[in-house]
């Protein structure tokens, strides 16, 4: 069968921009009228094609003419987007591949597709890829999802809107929003550096232990963990157990020995999970701790096997301790454990206690969780606000914002792990459904996946000179001082230009240039990540609003004043390191 010329060109363009999208040859689902209306069964996409599309175009040009990016649900007959793409970039959500095939037979969108002026989203996997685009990321302040026509105003419109909101929330979580928290983490990392340099290297551990065992069990502290503990105790000699720090004390009470215990947080309260007397119980356990942990953690673990690992943050990268490796790109300790298990190339990774939701009684954690009292009002706060599909499907679970974002992070990692032929099983038997996992009972997983006794790991000691790192920190401090002086001078020049009311347009370029220069510096750490991202998003918003030059410049100036203040704080922190 020979494709129409337009369809052939469009398919060729789609092959480059979205190689996994396969449009069907069959286009019988819809019929096309002379006025370019599309009919589906007894429905039609437009009541009056010309009037509706003209009204939509007039509305968009009156209110959204300066928006560099617009979002729509529903492709319709495509003519609206052919016109809009002349001035703007367009993202269109459309699940009906037959409709796309029909419209692509009629209109040539190949240039728009290749130039990414037109971006199509037909399924959730493509949504993950969409958020790799910088323009998409920074559009969160101007995001609105329009329906193409009344035909598309249905539950699918709400579905895509909710998924976009989830992805924006997850993105903002990754960018961080608490500079005090970030400074605390940086301070802890500097305090813990000398200890890290004297401990075994995480990278060496990975190389030694990779491919040694087939199945890992990640233990978290959701309410469903209670029912899994008796079986976990029975099979612990066969299972490589990865425990969250919060699960460590629970397992210890049950005399279940984890092989690895992970800790990610910088909070002093989290250190208390390890505030117990050293016993033989911990002899075969390796504690894998984030470098930004509170120093009390290291005090409590002094006589135990532990190593410190850097998180893959800008500040940690700037320290140039790459030989120690990085772990903990995700936001939860379960993410950290999963990343490690995947890096060790376990063929099967099993979750238990990974509810990411409240149980039917509103309980947030396993009943023996030591910090349970800190969460007593959480269910009341979150009830009905973060509903999600429950484990097993067919029902809804009560979740929270944090758990929703943790789940998104896990789902992203699980999809990545599939490329490595790693299978992920959710044996929690409760809580929220985690997309990408295979849902099986814990008993089934133990019977079918744990066929041999686990091999023990070995740990090499390692040590590198502290002087190299000290010099690196001093270099960062010096670079910070130099850039702070440069920024201070720019702000003074701007104030002079305002006073004289001259050369103002030059500062649109100067502000843009100085932010780009700063991003290239090693001193551009996680402390500035949220501020710089918000600045780019605000610039996009100012463009969309067609803001006057004074509003634009004064808004940008406020960001650089904040940047200057944060840079001074970071410089003081770095200068205090010895």
Image (tube, rainbow, N blue to C red):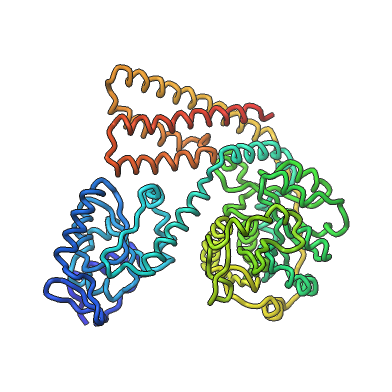
Name the residue furthest front: 380
* Frontmost residue, 106 versus 228: 228
Query: Residue 79's spot in the image, x, y percent?
Result: 19, 63
Residue at 81% over, 60% down: 284
Count of numbered circles in the view: 0
In terms of image quadrants, where is residue 252?
Answer: bottom right
* Frontmost residue, 305 versus 167: 167
Q: Classify residue 361 as left or right of residue 139.
A: right
Q: Is residue 491 above or below residue 176?
A: above
Query: Residue 256's spot in the image, x, y percent?
Result: 80, 66
Name the residue furthest left: 34
* Frontmost residue, 204 versus 283: 283
Q: Quadrant of the N terminus?
A: bottom left
* Frontmost residue, 163 versus 245: 163
Query: Residue 385's spot in the image, x, y percent?
Result: 53, 60
Query: Residue 310's spot in the image, x, y percent?
Result: 63, 46
Residue at 40% over, 61% down: 161
Q: Is residue 425 above or below residue 257?
A: below
In terms of image quadrants, where is residue 552?
Answer: top left
Q: Classify residue 106 as left or right of residue 379.
A: left
Residue at 63% over, 64% down: 358
Q: Quadrant of the C terminus?
A: top right
Q: Is residue 130 above or below residue 212?
A: above
């Amino acid at each position: 069968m020979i494709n129409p010329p337009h369809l052939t060109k469009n398919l060729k363009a789609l092959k480059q921009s979205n190689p996994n999208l396969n449009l069907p040859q069959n286009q019988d689902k819809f019929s096309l009228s002379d006025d370019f209306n599309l009919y589906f069964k007894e429905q039609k996409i437009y009541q009056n094609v010309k009037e509706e599309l003209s009204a939509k175009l007039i509305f968009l040009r009156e209110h959204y003419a300066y928006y560099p990016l617009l979002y729509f649900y529903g492709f319709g007959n495509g003519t609206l987007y052919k016109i809009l793409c002349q001035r703007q970039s367009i993202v269109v959500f459309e699940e009906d591949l037959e409709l796309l095939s029909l419209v692509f037979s009629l209109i040539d969108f190949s240039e728009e597709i290749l130039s990414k002026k037109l971006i199509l989203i037909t399924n959730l996997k493509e949504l993950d890829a969409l958020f790799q685009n910088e323009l998409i990321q920074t559009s969160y302040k101007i995001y609105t999802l329009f329906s193409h026509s009344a035909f598309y105003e249905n539950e699918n419109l709400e579905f895509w809107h909710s998924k976009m909101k989830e992805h924006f929330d997850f993105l903002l979580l990754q960018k961080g929003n608490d500079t005090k928290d970030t400074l605390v983490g940086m301070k802890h990392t500097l305090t813990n550096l000398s200890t890290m340099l004297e401990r075994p290297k995480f990278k060496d551990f990975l190389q030694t232990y990779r491919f040694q065992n087939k199945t890992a069990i990640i233990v978290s502290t959701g309410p469903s963990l209670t029912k899994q503990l008796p079986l976990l105790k029975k099979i612990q000699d066969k299972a490589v157990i990865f425990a969250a720090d919060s699960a460590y004390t629970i397992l210890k009470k049950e005399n279940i020995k984890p092989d690895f215990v992970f800790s990610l947080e910088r909070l002093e309260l989290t250190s208390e999970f390890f505030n117990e007397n050293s016993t033989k119980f911990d002899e075969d356990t390796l504690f894998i701790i984030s470098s930004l942990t509170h120093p009390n953690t290291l005090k409590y673990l002094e006589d135990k096997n532990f190593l410190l690992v850097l998180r893959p943050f800008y500040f940690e990268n700037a320290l140039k301790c790459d030989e120690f490796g990085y772990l903990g790109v995700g936001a939860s300790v379960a993410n950290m454990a999963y990343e490690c298990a995947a890096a060790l190339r376990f063929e099967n990774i099993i979750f238990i206690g990974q509810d990411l939701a409240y149980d039917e009684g509103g309980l947030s954690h396993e009943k023996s969780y030591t910090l349970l009292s800190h969460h007593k009002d959480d269910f009341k706060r979150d009830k009905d606000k973060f509903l999600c599909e429950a484990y097993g499907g067919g029902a809804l679970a009560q979740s929270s914002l944090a758990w929703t974002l943790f789940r998104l992070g896990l789902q992203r990692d699980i999809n990545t792990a599939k490329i490595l032929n790693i299978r992920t099983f959710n044996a929690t038997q409760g809580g929220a459904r985690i997309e990408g996992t295979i849902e099986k009972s814990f008993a089934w997983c133990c019977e079918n996946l744990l066929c041999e006794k686990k091999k023990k790991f070995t740990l090499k000691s390692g040590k590198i000179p502290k002087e190299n790192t000290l010099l690196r920190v001093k270099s960062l401090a010096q670079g910070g001082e130099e850039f702070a002086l440069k920024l201070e001078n720019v702000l003074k020049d701007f104030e002079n230009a305002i006073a004289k009311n001259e050369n103002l347009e030059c500062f649109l370029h100067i502000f843009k240039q100085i932010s780009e220069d700063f991003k290239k510096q090693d001193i551009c750490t996680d402390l500035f990540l949220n501020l710089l991202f918000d600045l780019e998003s605000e610039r996009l918003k100012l463009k969309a609003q067609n803001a006057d030059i004074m509003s634009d410049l004064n808004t940008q100036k406020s960001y650089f004043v904040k940047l200057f203040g944060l840079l001074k704080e970071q410089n003081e922190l770095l200068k205090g390191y010895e």
